[in-house]
Image (cartoon, rainbow, N blue to C red):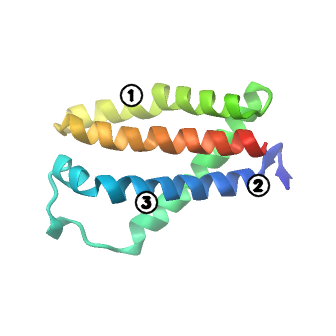
C-alpha cells in the first residue's frame, strides 16, 4: 500500500524496528544511561506515557524519513542507510550535543542517546530502503 509514494508497510515495519532497537538499547545500557542522566532508581517510575510517546515519535520519524528518501531519488537499501546517517549527523546529534552542553549533561549521556538515535535511524532507513 502506498500513500503519496510512501510505502505504509515500510513505515510501519521501520517504526516497529526503531521501537525494538530502543527497547534493546536501553535494556542493555539502562544502568549506564541512568548514571549519565544523574537519575536513581526512585527517579524512574515505569508508566505507559513515555512508551506511547516513543512509539508515536518512531512512527512520525519513519514516515518523514521515507518521504525524504523518496524525494532524493531511488529508494534502495543504500540510499536509506546513507540518508538516515546524514540526517542523524546534520540534525539529531548536533541538536543533542547543543542541548546537553547547555544542560551540563555528561558526555556519556550524549553518546548513549546519540548512539541510540543513530542505530534507530539507520535501521529505519534500511527497512524503508529494502521494502521500498
Compared to residue 52, the image places residue 24 above or below, namely: above
Q: Is residue 74 above or below residue 17?
A: above
* Residue at left offset 77%, top offset 34%: 75
At horizontal 25% and vertical 51% (from top left) the residue drawn is: 33
| Mark 3 touches mark 1? (CB < 8 Å) | no
Q: Residues within 10 Å of mark 3 (few under 14, many from 20)?
A: some
Quarter of the image with the N terminus in it: bottom right
Q: Which residue is mark 1?
A: 94
Q: Which residue is mark 2?
A: 8
Residue 84 visible from this viewpoint: yes
Where is residue 94 shown, x and y percent of the image?
39, 28
- Tell me which residue sits at (60%, 54%) in the image: 15
How many C-alpha atoms fall within 10 Å of the one at disc 2: few (<14), some, or many (≥20)? some
Is residue 90 positioned above or below 92 on the image? Answer: above
**119 relative position to 84: left or right:** left
Report the number of numbered marks: 3
Q: Marks 3 and 1: which is nearer the front?
A: 3
Tell me where residue 107 appears, x and y as whole percent.
Answer: 22, 34
Q: Would you say 8 lies left or right of 113 here?
A: right
Looking at the image, can residue 59 be seen? no
Question: Taking 15 as reference, is 37 left or right?
Answer: left
First-in-chain label (2 vs 1): 2
Q: Report which residue position mark 3 lands on.
A: 23
From mark 2 to mark 1, how far is it between C-alphas? 29 Å
Counting residues from the start of the chain, the first of labels 2 and 3 encountered is: 2
In 3D space, how far apart are the residues under numbered discs 3 and 1 (Cα atoms)? 23 Å
Q: Secondary structure at mark 1?
A: helix
Give SS at disc 2. helix
Left or right, residue 38 beside residue 56: left
Give the structural element (helix, strand or loop) at label 3.
helix
Calculate the distance from the C-alpha at mark 2 to the C-alpha at mark 3.
23 Å
Amino acid at each position: 500500500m502506498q500513500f503519496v509514494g510512501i510505502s505504509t508497510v515500510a513505515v510501519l515495519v521501520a517504526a516497529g524496528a526503531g521501537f525494538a532497537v530502543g527497547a534493546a538499547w536501553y535494556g542493555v545500557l539502562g544502568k549506564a544511561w541512568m548514571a549519565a542522566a544523574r537519575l536513581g532508581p526512585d527517579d524512574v517510575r515505569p508508566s505507559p506515557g513515555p512508551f506511547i510517546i516513543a512509539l508515536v515519535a518512531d512512527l512520525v520519524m519513519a514516515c518523514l524519513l521515507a518521504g525524504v528518501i523518496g524525494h532524493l531519488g531511488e529508494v534502495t537499501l543504500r540510499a536509506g542507510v546513507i540518508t538516515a546517517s546524514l540526517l542523524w549527523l546534520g540534525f539529531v546529534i548536533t541538536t543533542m550535543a547543543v542541548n546537553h552542553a547547555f544542560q551540563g549533561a555528561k558526555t556519556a549521556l550524549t553518546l548513549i542517546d546519540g548512539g541510540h538515535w543513530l542505530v534507530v535511524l539507520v535501521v529505519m532507513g534500511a527497512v524503508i530502503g529494502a521494502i521500498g
